[in-house]
Structure formats: structure tokens, C-alpha cells
Amino acid sequence: MLGDMKPFKMVGNLYFVGTYRASSHLIDTGDGLILIDSGYAETADVIVESVTELGFDIKDVKYILHSHGHSDHTDGTPRLLELTKAETFLGEGDVKYISGWAPNHFYQDGQVITLGNTNILCIATPGHTEGTFSFFFNVEENGQTYRAGMFGGAGTNQLKKPYLNRRKCSWLNRGLYFKSVERLKKEHVDVFVGNHTWNNKTKGKYETMLDSVENPFINDAEWVPFLEKCEKDAESVILNESRELFVNYAHRGASHYAPENTFLSFYLGIYMGANGIETDVQMTKDGVLVLFHDKTIDRMTGQEGSVSDYTLEELQQFTFEKNGLTDKIVVFEEFLKQFSFRDITFAIEIKQPGTEKDIADMLRKYGMHNKTIVTSFSLECIQIFKEYAPEYRVGFLTREVNEQTLEFLKEIKADELCPFATIVTTENVEKWHREGFNVRAWGVYSEELMRNVYDSMADGMTVNFPDKLVEYIK
């Protein structure tokens, strides 16, 4: 026996044929075999041997169903296709994860796959991956019919930001996961089939079966508690990261102390301990991207007009002053040259419609997609930016949040919600997290508000006095 677990009959015509690390299940339909998940490439022959040991012929596998596209569920498929003429099924969103084979069929949500005496209901349950599917089917034992069910992707480590970033997945996968769990709670399950052996304690139940008259796999009280645990685990991932990965954005730099959006302000913010910089981008009359917040330049320079009314050379004649400190306007590219290599997060706000592509091109030039969120108060601006540069995360700055806005943000795959600080409460943050959004507050104009935002479990905030936030976090 090659594997670390003996193949065995679970319930009725359902068998376990995988390994401890990579579950695979076999269904004998009376008109051919269905295999659910193919494991790792190096364990494919374990499945072959297990099928043989149970008295079946691997050539009789007609369908291979994949719960999702991760390697421990799909990499064995090329080897199995060398031995069978099986048709393969996968969620369309997971094609990017597989290699060495192409699926014959993409699942449709609610589709029923029928072979012989078995009908398998396939339900879309994204979150663990974009194309995760869960399966439900009947099995019979001792004249009784039981409903078997598998959550196609229950793991929550894959919801952590570093993992999602490496896989180039949307943070919205978190919201999809919560919705999938809620949907699965409505399904009745008598036989909980583990997508991994530790989900349903496959190994322990097998050992119990050896000395028990009762079948431990038949238990209609397991399914919902398991889903509730999945839900709590996902919540813990988000809450832990809201503390461990919290971003203290120096708002236009340390703008409480130095002239905003200047090198003085940015460097002071980093010196004070900020692990993020927030800034605003506009374009000059001669087409140069610069860092400036207001629609007009009068507050900063005492002059009339807007940034777009002046050339860069003309703007460089003006000085910005605060608290006895003086500096000049910053060119966006010069800012990136100075800061792009640093291990900090950037929030880049689009201030002028029509500059979305220019900003994206500049960010791409400096490889900023892993450390930047592009924001705007304009839904249209972030939609245009996202369509042009889908590899970047975008966020929406807003004074109020409603369901229509949340749905639109999900449609355009915006990862971050940036609400005004006064509406950031623990209850709201929990709700927005469950929708899948990263939550970063703006408009933090007092230390009391700063403390309230941090204590709400938000993921970050822009603040003019990053030193005070550093001290509060400590």
C-alpha cells in the first residue's frame, strides 16, 4: 500500500481512496465510477492502488470532479487521465490554478451531475478560491437513504492577505466565503464528507468503525457546527490581521506638523513610525503628475487657479509653509523614486478625472501593485482605473455607506471601503468585513476619533499625526 491511509467504504457506495493530506473519494454509481478530487501529482498512484484494492478498475472512472483548483485537489489529474477516459469538471474561476490538463466541463451553479444511480448537486461556494464548488448526493446503507455533503473549500488560511496577494486574488474572497457558509447552512447533511481528512476526522472515524456497530460517518449533527467553526475561523483571520497588519497612513505625510504633500511631510511621517503614506495626485498644464490635494492652489500658495492652470515650472516657483517649515510641490515620479522601495503601504488618491491611466502607468513603472491601493471619491474614477489596471487594488472614499454602493463596489472588484471616520463603529466594521471589504477610515481629525477608529477593528486610517497613533497602538 503506497498511501498513509487504507482505502475503505464510508457509507453505502461512497469510499475513501486518498491520503491524509489529500482526500479523494470514490462513488460507485453502478454505471461507472465518480472520483472527487485527484490529490497531488505524487499521490495519484495511491488513488489507483486504492481503487484496485477495493475491487474496482481505475478504467471505470467516468467522471473526475474537482472541488476547487488548488494543487492538492487537481495535480493528480494528468496521471489519472493517462489511465482513464474520464471527463473532468472544475469551477471556471479556478482554471488559473491548474496545469497539465484542461477541464471538459465547467460547473454551473445548481447543476446536477448524473451517472448511474447517483445524482450530485453542485453548488457554487466561492471564497477559498473563486471557483470552489460543494457537492451533495444521496447514499444508501441498510435500507436507509442518507444525504452526503462536502464543503468544497473550507480552509481559512487562504483568506489571509499575504496569501491572497501572492495568488493575485481579491480580498473580496472573504465576503464570498461568509456568503457561501451561510448558503451551506441551509443544506441538510447526514454524512459529512471532508474536503480534507481533518474536516470530518476521517482517520479517527475509520478507526472507530473497526470496533463499532454504528457507522460514525452517519451523523446529522456535525454539518452546521462545522460551518459555524469555519465562520469563526474566518472572522479570527480578519480580526487578527486588522491588528497585525494595521496601516497607519501619514495623511499627506505628517501634515499636522509639516506642509502637506511635501518631502518634508512624508519623511517626517516615516520618522514618526507611520507604515503607510497617503497622498493625492493631479496633473499640471503641461501633463506632469504632481502631489496636491485641493481643487485650487490658493490655500497653499495664496495664488488663484488650479494645478491644471499651471505648468510644472510655474508651480515650482511657489513654496508651501507650515510651523516654520518650507518646501515645494512634489512630482509624483520623484516621490516614487524616493519611497517605492520602502516596506510601506501607499494610498494614492485620484483627484482629477482623466488622469487614471497616467497614474496607473506611473505606478506600473515602479512596480507598486503589491503595496498600493488607489482611491477616489469618484466611483467612475476608480472603475476606470480598475478596468485599465486590474492588478491594482482600489478603494472608495465616502461620507456615507449604503447597500447600493457596496454592491457596485463588489461589481467593480474594489477591495477597500474608505468611510468617513465618524461612521466607523465596531458594528459597521464587522458588517463591512463580512461583505469582504478592507476598512480604512479617513477624516480622523481628533485623537478621540483616532482611538475610536482603531478600537473598532478597522484595518487602517489616514491621520495627520501618525506619531500619536503609534503611541496609542503601543
Image (cartoon, helix red, strand yellow):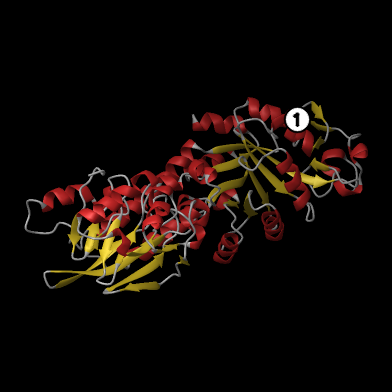
11 vs 197: above or below: below
The residue depicted at 9 percent of the width and 59 percent of the height is 214
Q: Quadrant of residue 388?
A: bottom right
Say if residue 189 shows up in the picture.
Answer: yes
401 vs 474: above or below: below
- Residue 335 lies, in percent from the top left, at 75, 34
- Residue 112 lies, in percent from the top left, at 37, 73
Q: Mark 1 points at which residue?
A: 263
Which element type, helix, strand or loop, lies under badge 1?
A: helix
Q: Which residue occupies the foreground of this view, 157 or 296?
A: 157
Q: Which residue occupies the foreground of this view, 119 or 281?
A: 119
Q: How crowded is mark 1: few (under 14 residues within 10 Å), some or many (20 or more)?
A: many
Left/right of residue 308 with respect to residue 406 in the rendered view: right
- Residue 302 lies, in percent from the top left, at 88, 40
Left/right of residue 175 with respect to residue 155 in the rendered view: right
408 vs 261: above or below: below
Quarter of the image containing the N terminus? top left
Q: Which residue occupies the foreground of this view, 156 or 415?
A: 156
Say if residue 306 shows up in the picture.
Answer: no
Please, what is the three-letter code of the amino acid marked with disc 1? Phe
- Residue 453 lies, in percent from the top left, at 53, 44
Q: In which quarter of the image is residue 186?
A: bottom left
Q: How many labels does the image show?
A: 1
Left/right of residue 375 with respect to residue 434 in the rendered view: right
Q: In which quarter of the image is residue 408?
A: bottom right
